[in-house]
Image: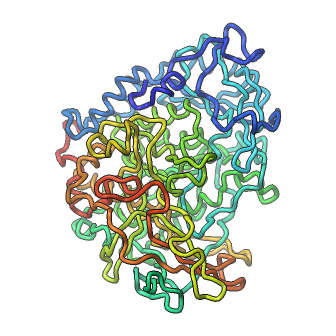
Amino acid sequence: MHPYLTRALLASAAAAVLTPAAAVSAGAATPARRALPGSRPGWAAPSRDRGAADQTRQVQVRLYLPLRDAADAQALARAVSDPGSASYGQYLTPVAFRQRYAPSDADVAAVRHFLAGAGLQVGDVPANHSNVPATGTVAQVERAFGVDVHRYAFRGRLLNAPTAAPSLPASLQGKVVAITGIDDSGVLIHPGTRQGDDPAPAPRPDAPLTRPSPTGDATDQKASPAPPPPAFINAPPCSAYFGEKAATGTPPVAGTTQPYAPCGYTPGQFQGAYGIGPALQQGIDGSGVTVAITDAYAAPTILQDANRYASAHGQQPFAAGQFTQVLPRKKFRYGYDARHPEKDVCGEQGWYGEETLDVEAVHAIAPGAKVVYVAGRSCGDGDLLDALNAVVDNRLATIVTNSWGDVGEDVPPDELVAYDQTFVQAALEGIGVFFSSGDDGDDSIDTADGSPAVDFPSTDPWVTAVGGTSLGVGAADGNLFETGWSTGRSALSDDGTAWDPPAPGDFLYGAGGGVSTVFGEPFYQRGVVPDAIAGGHRATPDIAMDGDPNTGMLVGETQTFPDGSARYAEYRIGGTSLASPLYAGIEALADQAAGRPHGFANPAIYALSGTPSVRDISAKPPVAGVVRNDYVNGVDAADGVSTTLRYLDDELGSIHIAPGWDTITGVGAPNGVDYVTHLGPSRTPAGQ
């Protein structure tokens, strides 16, 4: 099925494989049923079981169907993406993909028949037949799939999951590869934005995951009901460019006074630091290219905010038709409810900031590109996959940036395959898919046993994982330095004479990276990623751009202030959620320069490793860190100001910068016009 899945997952995640009925828990199946292996999350352990789930809760399940001739699809995806292949750039149309690889009408009909016969309400099937959705109560789902659904305590929440592997009629053998929606793994997905030390409120401990209303699935979606997010304002002093203001009066580090953190970089500063000004002056601004953004929910003020921001910082606002939104036909799920805050398990308002950052960052780098925002109904896997599938199956764009992901790869194996099939279709159609690599370094602060991990979906071999750097932009918008993003934090002592703990302080956050335990090493990484690191596995990230919140982007967004007013304000934000849309903008310039889409870009990216087109990130920064002031209440000095040292050092975890490819920045950062003009052959393939 998948040339990159590790041996341990081949049996459980292979399409068209169902285990014998004997493997199903006693009483949960008949001899005419088969269990679907790999369809339970690893966190659903007996020790976390808190009893039966609410039988009346409405859920939406999706049954994913395997591609026809998946091995051939993957082989062709490689050929059209590899600059060394004679088939490079000869992409399929969505119609051609469906004719060649989409599941058959008969298989879709069989799955629909099963779901309807089980009493579930079957929804619309996408044109590529990737999945069949259905809704019903937990009780109906239990009967349909021969399982008991319980609540499990995990990461401060009570999440639903089946107590055993779901089963299906034997007649569906070979027709279903994955099921989503029976468990709540998807709500663990989160945006990667960072403002302060804790950018989003934590969920209420052991909050059960419940729907806002039982009728939500039947109501047409018009607009998000959630108000703008709580306000966040930068506390002064901060620097207009890196090093502008020295933090005099604060304790020196290694005998040197550190600078105040930048207030947030603007479009012109990013354009200068990444050397794309000459390309923009020559009209290489992303014109003719469409970039898609997927996130959960939709900010109601996004276009007016993005246009106001662009006008305030020397850019043209979006022209008529240059920005569009694709919203789900039905109500958003698991979202904001002022009367019941515990129901907002996805943090709907937090996704507004993510969308704002993504849209404004893409426009900052590629002001001529079209941008289409495709909203997921929630942060759940099925809903975000729907958003991705809408882009891919309709070829709404040739570039897709996604600033979200799970912490680690603790995703049911069958869901990995469901995602992977979408990414293979994207590669076949010449669509490049980019994901943030994560914001918790090697994830050891999040895993149960403190072991390193990497974040899915960025680990999938068919996507480009974008890591993060700390970027110093000078007074003339030049690149003063760029290093791997990994931040240590120290607080100013009460008497103002020392940093506590001494530098480098305690690890706070940093770009994600490392080695997958799920996927094998892809062809394009061989000979570039050191064998001692990869060990035969997929390693991330692939490339990097600015992600450090302390050297982040200044964005503008309508926010809700303590007095209840909602108004536009600007603030600094970062995370690899910044790096991914910045890179998507660079990719748009490269697509325009080449006169064609680069599609799945990793083979072309790795071909540039070690060349002048890529800036190797291997040097320490010229300063130890930056001093940062933050309002205690997030908006003003009424409750005081906290002063911290943010240490710019990558030696705080198990991943580090190094000459050549490394586990924080991949091959490095794109080097201006040289990168834009040398990414892949510039010829236009036949038929394009």
Left or right: 185 as drawn, with respect to 479: right
Q: Position of residue 107 (x, y in %)?
A: 53, 17
Q: Which corner quadrant of the image does residue 186 belong to? A: top right
Q: Position of residue 129 (x, y in %)?
A: 50, 27
Up the image or down, 29 lies above or below 573; here it is: above
Name the residue at 63% across, 83% down. Answer: 493
Q: Position of residue 548 (x, y in %)?
A: 47, 66
Q: Position of residue 452 (x, y in %)?
A: 52, 48
Which residue appears farthest toward the top when viewing the image? Answer: 31
Q: Is residue 599 visible?
A: no
- What is the number of callouts on the image? 0
Which residue appears farthest toward the bottom when viewing the image? Answer: 249
**Viewer-proximal residue, 368 or 472?**
472
Q: Which corner quadrant of the image does residue 482 belong to? A: bottom left
Q: Is residue 153 visible?
A: yes
Name the residue at 52% across, 34% down. Answer: 416
Name the residue at 79% across, 28% down. Answer: 139
Up the image or down, 491 lies above or below 167; here it is: below
In this figure, which colouring scheme has been used for the structure? rainbow
Left or right: 580 as drawn, with respect to 338: left
Rendered-image quadrant of the N terminus: top left
Rendered-image quadrant of the C terminus: top left
